[in-house]
Image (spheres, grey):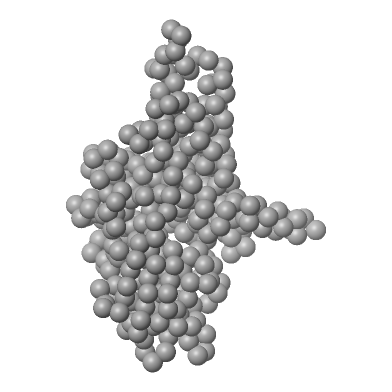
Amino acid sequence: MNLELTDEQVALRDTTRRFLADKAPISGHVRELLDDPAGIEDAVWRGLADLGTTGLLVPEEHGGAGMTMIEAGVVAEELGAALHPGPWLSTAVAAPRALTHLCDNASAATILAGIAGGTTIATVSFLDFENVAVYAGDVLRGELGDVSDAAAADILLVLAEEPNGTGLFAVNTDTATVTVAPERGIDQTRKQFRVRLDGTPARRLATAAPADVAAVIDDLLIATAADALGAARAVMDLAVEYAKVRKQFGQVVGSFQAIQHLCVDMYETVELARSGVIHALWAADAATPEERHLAAARAKAFAGRLATVGDTAIQVFGGIGYTWEHDAHLCLKRLLSWSALLGGPDRYLAEVGARLTKRGR
């Protein structure tokens, strides 16, 4: 495992960072989309697709770059730092990984090509094994909660129970029998929905083996950890720069030992998270299923610690950090949404501890 980015990965990071700073800044883009149900602007999404970021995980035979989760993590971190609200994680990570883990090339070809080209926005409805519809009479029925980016999506990938097991199905979201209702959470840059399928036509793509579904969930957790790392890095950098220029009692506040300790605490937490994220991104493609899952669980177990970076930064900012106009609260909310995703960190700490104990026997 290489802890340093290659020249190509550095170029991908820098290009993505420049694009987001120029075309999707927090002040002129992110804030304007906080109350937008889709959370997407066509020109920005088209730009991300033109950079090749939507097709990073799409195989080359379908028009994608055929890259690894490490490259996806590079982009995810930059999107997290920019608090980007669009459906990139759903479309560029969750959907391609679901299609490549569960499907053969023929059944998934059209969707993958659309994702790579930026013409198809897709999302998955299964963040756990409980969000499952029922397939009967060639249609889907069921109510699915916590579906990311459903209002922006053209295609919804659904797990559904069949007479002989569980299958993966593709649903067109513009169908009249699909109802999408927003679910408001703490993070307005994350768009969550409840989707109702009431006799909805669907195309069966594949049989959904539990191990393959678990791999998709792990991959999405790992990519979201990279996104959260970016948000933590961004709010830490803001706080450190603020500490260098804000004066109290005739001195910059960064000269006070208490503020220095807070900045060091933030830096330590961010760098510890970075090592875990890098390992998890590597494990998603190169490790055994057990090691990949353990790496994903470790990253999630650390989520609570990473969220404290937002809290600490607000302490450095003082009163201004609590205002709506400042970006610190948006970063904190992004980190809190990561901490809450698929359950709080305690559940994952217990799982990691149990697995490591078992391994040591």
Residue 128, position as x, y percentages in the image? 52, 67
Which residue is farthest right?
A: 361
Residue 28, position as x, y percentages in the image? 23, 40
Name the residue rendered at 38%, 92% in the picture: 137
Name the residue rendered at 40%, 23% in the picture: 242
| Whether residue 92 is visible | no
Which residue is farthest bottom?
A: 137
Question: Where is 99 relative to 177, above or below?
Answer: above
Tell whether 155 sits left or right of 68: left
Tell whether 38 sits left or right of 271: left
Name the residue rendered at 43%, 71% in the picture: 144
Question: Where is 55 relative to 162, above or below?
Answer: above
Which residue occupies the foreground of this view, 5 or 84? 84
Residue 277, position as x, y percentages in the image? 52, 47
- Quarter residue 138 falls in: bottom left
Which residue is farthest top?
A: 250
- Position of the C terminus, as image quadrant, is bottom right
Which residue occupies the foreground of this view, 126 or 352? 126
Which residue occupies the foreground of this view, 163 or 133? 133
- Count the marks: 0
Residue 299, position as x, y percentages in the image? 56, 50
Tell whether 298 sits left or right of 20: right
| Whether residue 229 is visible | yes
